[in-house]
């Protein structure tokens, strides 16, 4: 990946942001109902270097799925290619809902694709910081039932040398203004102090001060 084998040990978590849900969509007329139908197909995975471009090919590989080609571009460009018949499926990893998909399904009949349990299990064996989860029914009109897929948490991070008092004040303001964040994107509902326990990375001391102040007990694995 982008780290090229180098360890980055100066990163510290400040607060939990949201869960990223991996999902794709295809025009219903293609007959594609599952990522298992993507053998020999053209698949979009977002711009080079992004989370979906990094992990979608690995997810497909875990399922033994071999697309004809992987296309990297902006989501909007890939969406246009899909509508023009130049692309079979468009994938992302985003907080819910994916606005582009919500817009597309108002003008086109689509199938929303998650990640089946057997593929998810095979993938998680290699990448244990991922988890299985469901896209709740009602998130998209084209997905009337809960849709199983892969998820991964996103956290706001900083350098370990960032001043404790600054990180403490920043963390406090984030939670104080959570409702303003939710107005910008619904996924900010997950900006909850209790979700900090999902972090695989130690917390910044300034953030720890805030969490302990509100009564959370921070375990040793989350302390630097």
Image (spheres, helix red, strand yellow):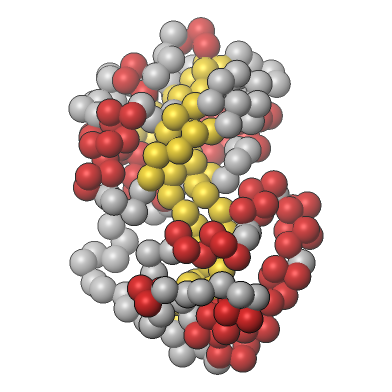
Q: Position of residue 88 (x, y in %)?
A: 43, 21
Q: Could you tell me how many numbered marks the image carries?
A: 0
Res 220 quadrant in image:
bottom left
In the rendered structure, the answer to whether residue 204 lies left or right of residue 5 reads right
The residue positioned 65% from the left and 21% from the top of the image is 141
Can I make out residue 74 in this image? no
Res 163 quadrant in image:
bottom right
Can I make out residue 9 in this image? yes
Q: Position of residue 196 (x, y in %)?
A: 51, 65
What quarter of the picture does the N terminus occupy?
Answer: bottom left
The residue positioned 56% from the left and 53% from the top of the image is 18
Image position of 18 with respect to 173: above or below:
above
Viewer-side residue, 101 vs 217 = 217
Image position of 55 with respect to 65: above or below:
below
Image position of 9 with respect to 178: above or below:
below
What quarter of the picture does the C terminus occupy?
Answer: bottom left
In the rendered structure, the answer to whether residue 37 lies left or right of residue 89 reads left
Image position of 119 with respect to 194: above or below:
above
In the rendered structure, the answer to whether residue 182 lies left or right of residue 111 reads right
Q: Position of residue 189 (x, y in %)?
A: 67, 52
The residue positioned 45% from the left and 38% from the top of the image is 133
The residue positioned 73% from the left and 62% from the top of the image is 178
Viewer-side residue, 134 vs 83 = 134
Q: Position of residue 90 (x, y in %)?
A: 47, 30
């Amino acid at each position: 990946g982008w780290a090229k084998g180098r360890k980055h040990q100066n990163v510290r978590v400040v607060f939990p942001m949201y869960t990223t849900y991996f999902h794709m969509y295809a025009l219903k007329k293609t007959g594609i109902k599952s990522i298992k139908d993507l053998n020999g197909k053209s698949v979009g995975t977002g711009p080079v270097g992004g989370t979906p471009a990094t992990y979608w090919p690995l997810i497909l590989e875990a399922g033994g799925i071999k697309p004809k080609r992987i296309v990297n571009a902006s989501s909007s460009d890939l969406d246009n290619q899909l509508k023009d018949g130049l692309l079979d499926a468009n994938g992302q990893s985003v907080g819910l809902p994916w606005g582009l998909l919500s817009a597309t399904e108002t003008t086109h009949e689509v199938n929303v694709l998650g990640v089946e349990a057997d593929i998810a299990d095979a993938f998680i064996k290699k990448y244990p910081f991922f988890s299985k989860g469901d896209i709740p029914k009602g998130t998209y009109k084209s997905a009337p039932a809960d849709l199983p897929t892969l998820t991964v948490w996103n956290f706001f991070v900083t350098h370990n040398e960032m001043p404790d008092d600054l990180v403490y004040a920043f963390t406090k303001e984030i939670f104080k203004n959570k409702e303003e964040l939710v107005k910008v994107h619904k996924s900010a509902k997950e900006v909850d102090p209790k979700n900090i326990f999902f972090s695989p990375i130690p917390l910044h001391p300034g953030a720890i001060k805030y969490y302990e102040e509100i009564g959370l007990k921070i375990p040793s694995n989350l302390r630097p």
